[in-house]
Amino acid sequence: MSRHEIEITLINKHGLHARPATQFVQLANKYESKIEVIKKDLVVDGKSVTSMLTLGAEKGTLLRIRVDGQDADEAISKLSGLIKGKFGEE
Amino acid sequence: MEIKKGIGVSPGVVICQAVVLDAEEYRIPERHISADRAGEEAERLEHALAGARKELTELRDNTAKRLGKETGAIFDFHLALLDDQTLLEKIRDKIKTESVTAEFAVATVLREYAREFLQMPEYLAERVKDVYDVEKRILRRLIGESREGLGHLTEDVVVLAHDLTPSQTASMDRKHIMGLAIDAGGRTSHTAIVARALGIPAVVGLNDVSVFVNTGDVVIIDGNRGLVIIEPDEATIEENRQFLRRQVEFARELDRLRDLPAITMDGHEITLLGNIEFPGEAENVLARGGQGVGLYRTEFLYLEKETEPTEENHYEAYCKVIEAMDGRPVCIRTLDLGADKYTQAHLLIQERNPFLGLRSIRFCFQHLQLFKTQLRAILRASMKGEVSVMFPLITTVMELRQAKMILRDVMEDLEEEGVEVRTDVPVGMMMEVPSAALQCNQFAQEVDFFSIGTNDLIQYTLAVDRTNERVAPLFTAANPAVLRLIKEVIRAGQRYDVGVTLCGEMGSDPEYLLLLLGMGLRTFSVAPPSVPELKKAIRSITIEHARRVARHVATLNTDKQIVSYLRNQIREVMPEAY
């Protein structure tokens, strides 16, 4: 069991719109760990695309990602990699 | 108790519990279920979700293959919605705690999200479309299931819906359907025709009845007055029960007429035939005193199954009818699919004006194999009885010749194969397009009989879509131009000794009986339940009177004058009919 919590800024063009949110959720669902995404004091389930969208996170938003579970190490590195890599957008 | 007014299109009254069908893109009314059915609803939901997921995965993969991965990824968002546990839990929870149907739960939860997205930044507001799309996809699955559910009913019900398609009515368990009521439609809509064929009450043009009734509610469908009474009180139920008892007596009286000839008081014999859609109805024709089948609509062979009917499917159905009729005439009309009778499955490209589009005989000419399969079966079956074949929607002489030529080709093929066929099968055509009616003298020299299809003839002459409730009141057989075309066709028949039958709804309306007889018509083909009433009317009038009526109508210029005159005339001889 491990637990990680990191802060990361959205740097892709439109922030967390439908496609990046879908990619994030698809990736998150590959892991057993509980994954939460936090914007200010709003905490949502990182495996639910509707919840992620309701964050309304635009470019430049600072997000906290909290991962808790057996595969947390890999999950946090892959998820932050996805955000840092601008979700594959150029 | 709530009373909704529509158009009564098939007579009778029924008190029964309702089954309500949802229509796509229609408001889903709140449907409460008993708490013990929540498990069943939850299962339906999971089933629909699984189906939708599979459909979307295929769609995504196919799209990706054709248009690239980027485009296919649009559906990834849809799939993510279907896999969103937060969302699904809300739907599941709603079914359980509020005891509502899966449809209602899906629609309300997804619409809550849609509303929320609308308040978000612009790029998310755009996603509302996707949410609706997913909603529709799930609902289609759920509603699709309940459609199939009509095939296996265990108790008597009346069906309420926004509209009914031919494939829906084809798959219905007809033993248990006691009445129909729909929001859409006019007097000659598909639902009306089916209801009359089945002899059950029907009301159409109710606008929004399907939103007000819940499955399981008790309703009264009054096809005589065009009313649907939702959750009637005791007094109303009792009043309708009394009416039903009187109806039963009237029906018994009509039954006594069954074995009496259809003969006018001054000794003119009239032929009364039945219109049928399903082979099973052939017996009903005889039970009601019909002398044969004047119109066997074959569309249901194509609509009842997913796959195209084989020659054997056709042959078996035809033989069943022919055997039931036991030597009496059977007129088989070739495929008349298209426009209002079209199934989505066949409709590859939406036509802008399907009534003027690729339908009926035109469709057959472009699908020769399908046409020939049917003709082969008709010709083979013709060995078993008095069969005639009839082509629908003939518009030009060339079309008739082409149809006859194909029939001859098929006949030769069969002969070459050593299959016995009758080479003298009478060939007829529907008179339902004004151009054909205007050229009836030419046509009369090339066919053995005419069958006047008043429904289409009226709609094409008056340019009125009979299924559009907004203009349906303009649809009337009493229009002087329509009557003139009918008269011309009857006259051409007399001139060239070509049989003339009238097989539209007009023929079963006693109001027009005197006029049609006066014009010279002697053969009617009507829905079987209408045979006794028509016979009773025939037995109480004289041809002499009918001729006078026809002469007078020829001097009138408006449909209103004509209708009121005809009503008065028939009331004089048959007051009990009104």
Image (cartoon, coloured by chain):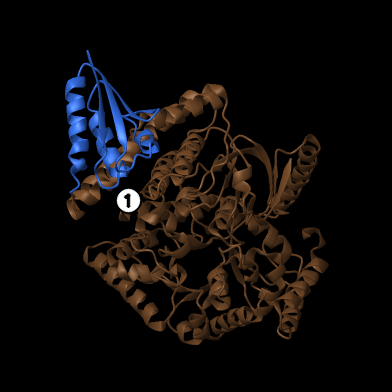
For the residue pair B373 and B337, the one nearer the viewer reads as B337
Question: Percent x, y for residue B359?
Answer: 41, 68
For the residue pair B344 and B15, the one nearer the viewer reads as B344
Residue projecting furthest to the top: A1
The N terminus of chain B sits in image quarter: top right
Question: Percent x, y for residue B419?
Answer: 27, 61
Residue carrying label 1: B307
Q: Is residue B120 above or below residue A52?
A: below
Q: Residue at x 20, y 25 (%)?
A: A75
Q: Residue at x 64, y 63 (%)?
A: B508
**Along the horizontal axis of the image, is A47 left or right of B149?**
left
Binning the other alpha carbons within 10 Å of mark 1 as few (below 14), some (14 to 19) or many (20 upward) gives few
Q: In this view, does B208 lie above or below B47?
A: below
Within the image, what quadrant is residue B19 found in? Answer: top right
Q: Residue at x 30, y 32 (%)?
A: A63
The C terminus of chain B sits in image quarter: bottom right
Q: In this view, does B529 lie above or below B515?
A: above
| Callout 1 secondary element | loop
Question: Percent x, y for residue B526?
Answer: 59, 62
**Along the horizontal axis of the image, is B518 left or right of B165?**
right
Color used for chain B? brown
Color used for chain A? blue
Amino acid type, label 1: Thr
Q: Is residue A50 above or below residue B504?
A: above
Question: Percent x, y for residue B399?
Answer: 38, 78
